[in-house]
Image (cartoon, grey):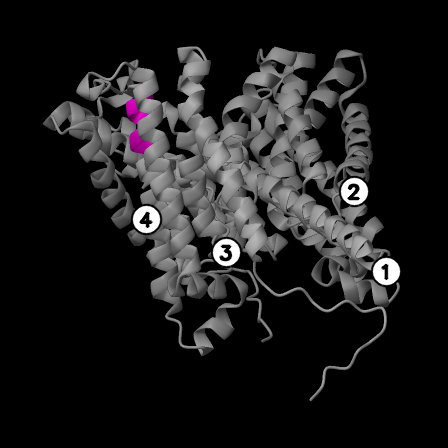
Amino acid sequence: MEPIAVPGLKPLAPAGPTGQAILWRRLVLTGLLVLALLLPFAFKSFIVFQLTMAMVYAIAILGLNLLTGFNGQFSLGHSAFFAVGAYAAAIMIEGFDVGAYWTLPAAGAICFVFGFLFGLPALRLEGIYLALATFALAIAMPPILKLSPLEPWTGGVQGILVSKPDVPFGLPLSQDQWLYYVVLAVGLVLALGATNLVDSRTGRAVMAIRDNPIAARAMGINVSLYKTLTFGVSAFYTGIAGALGAVAVSFVAPDSFTFVLAIGLFVGMVVGGVGSIPGALFGGLFVLFVPNIAEQVSKGLAGAVYGVILILVIYLMPTGAAGLVRLIVHKLALNWRRKHRLTQGA
Amino acid sequence: VELLLHQVLAGLATGAIYACMALAIVMIYQAIDHLNFAQGEMAMFSTFVGWQMMQWGLPYWGAFFATVALSFLAGVVIERVVFKPLGDAPVLSHIVVFIALFAIINSAAGFIWEFTIKPFPTPFGTQPLFGHGLISAHDAGMIAITVIMLVLLYMFFRYTRIGLAMRAAAANPASARLVGIRVGWMLALGWGMAASLGAVAGMLIAPVVFLEPNMMLSILVYGFAGAVLGGLTSPGGAVVGGFSVGVIENLAGTFIPHVGQELKLPIALALIVAVLTVRPSGIFGTRLVTRV
């Protein structure tokens, strides 16, 4: 059948990015990567450390995003996985002399199992009820870490000091700069992994469950399995972030992992863009820098300034930074196409 | 057995605090269909306003009702100014705005009234009730007021036109608008009512925990737990849930050896999560049936 030409109606653009869009995206990504590689030489070591921490948070937010953004499961408890990852790394490094880099996969694996197990009861809960259950996990974590029977390993309230790894191969870098590159590399690998996961058959199943669990089940997707696995993978990401954080800060203590951290990660995810992988980086930067900015504006009213900034950010971009970028790119593309058509017509 | 009885009663007394809070939470959940994370801070701020009025020389009940009225207005204003422009933004964005409100109110209260703890008067007196040391007059008064509020709310939602309209607006905004309910104003009304309920809860709680900007933090957590345990759709359930959380917490602290005291809160929460896995919508909550 011939398509009916309706005057004034544009043909729909093909779904998915066109060749030009992919080219642009690659250019932007390469530019950002070069920028990221140069940054440690442009700033003082404290700022390099802050950027490292922002990337660590970004990895944790990425983990949370896999769970909430792509699978639709709500969590206010990711500080617990972050804590488990951090403590696993710290105990392995200080107690068992494991190399700092080897603790990353180990901490990730421990968190995967932990997250998978927590995902089992979470299967029964939805929405706000799940939020409360995960929030309970976040609240429970610091007292558990402080427990006296566990003190020989966790160091109780005192926490554990972690030594930073030395710069290998005699590279002319400071420890902070080297750690920055380590975190950058790990973050890139994890982000790439997340992108591929989301684009895969598994990723489509995970998103189908978010969009309509009943339809997903009817199509033969094992909803329980995928939901618990997503919980595990999400915890895996956040656990690795925790381990990196422990090494970067070179200290772990129970009170660094309260529910305030969980809420921070959640805010970072929403501000960066729910269901956006690059958005996590923006979220990480927001979580790290905006409270500091608020403090500089006014010491006494830091919380209020932070809150006002947060509300303004949500007004400005209700779907997060990723949503805003998408909107701008879309508008620009429309404009460009319109102009293009005009010049062709003339 | 006497220890058990004593602990249960003590638990009921703290449970009354949580029940107040849980009631306010369920109330706003019914009206706006979201959990308000800033609820506790709003209550705290209202309590400070009441305290300030008493400092200026108003009698207790005068300050009490003035605070409730002011809180109602403040709740309406917050809805109109902060949440109306947000419109149809995703739920997660709404929650972030709740968190922002939390930060703003907490920090503002600390800025205005400082972080030192202040005593708050009680209208019921602190002497033990019936001459025993089991339960104080204030605790009994708190429980009584909670129950009265519950009955009033139940009647409001069950028997008045406007209560019905509010429930409709929360449950199905589109259909409610089609039958002529002004959904936006129903939401604002819900915010106002929740704010004044919070003010009542705050002023009842303040004599027990003392007034300071962070007084509501743990109470909010317990209140949520109570509300969720009882079922977010049921005000009566929220009150029962609040009382049970108080009792569970107290019993866990007393009777579980070694870790009981240290892990009081986690144990209470773990129990609640365990209950939820059996009854995912809370004990008294109605299960939502989804249409495919």
Look at mark 2 in the image and give the residue it sits on: B85
Q: Chain of mark 4?
A: A
Q: Which residue corresponds to mark 4?
A: A115
Mark 1 falls within which chain?
B
Chain ID, mark 3: A
**Both marks 2 and 1 on one chain:** yes
Against A279, is A68 above or below? Answer: below
**Few, some or many residues within 10 Å of mark 1 (<14, 14–19, 20+):** some
> Where residue A325 sits: x, y (%)?
63, 42
Is residue B6 toward the left or the right of residue A70 in the image?
left
**Would you say A40 lies left or right of B219 here?**
left
Q: Which residues are magenta?
A: A242-249
| Marks 4 & 1 on one chain | no
Do the dots labelled 4 and 3 sit on one chain?
A: yes
Which residue position holds label 3?
A72
**Which percent across, then down, holds residue A129?**
49, 53
Residue at the left extreme of this rendering: A96
Q: Secondary structure at mark 3?
A: loop
| Kind of element beneath mark 1 | loop
Q: Position of residue B252 (x, y in %)?
A: 33, 39
On the rendered image, what quadrant is the C terminus of chain A found in?
bottom right
How packed mark 4 is, by other alpha carbons closer than 10 Å (few <14, some 14-19, many 20 or more), is: many
Depth check, mark 2 against mark 1: the one in front is 2
What separation in Å lies between label 2 and label 3 (alpha carbons)? Answer: 25 Å
Mark 4 or mark 3, earlier in chain: 3
Task: Give the amino acid at mark 1.
Answer: Ile
Residue B106, magenta (yes or no): no
Q: Which residue is mark 1?
A: B181
Q: Amino acid at mark 2?
A: Pro
Q: Amino acid at mark 3?
A: Gly
The residue type indicated by label 4 comes to Gly
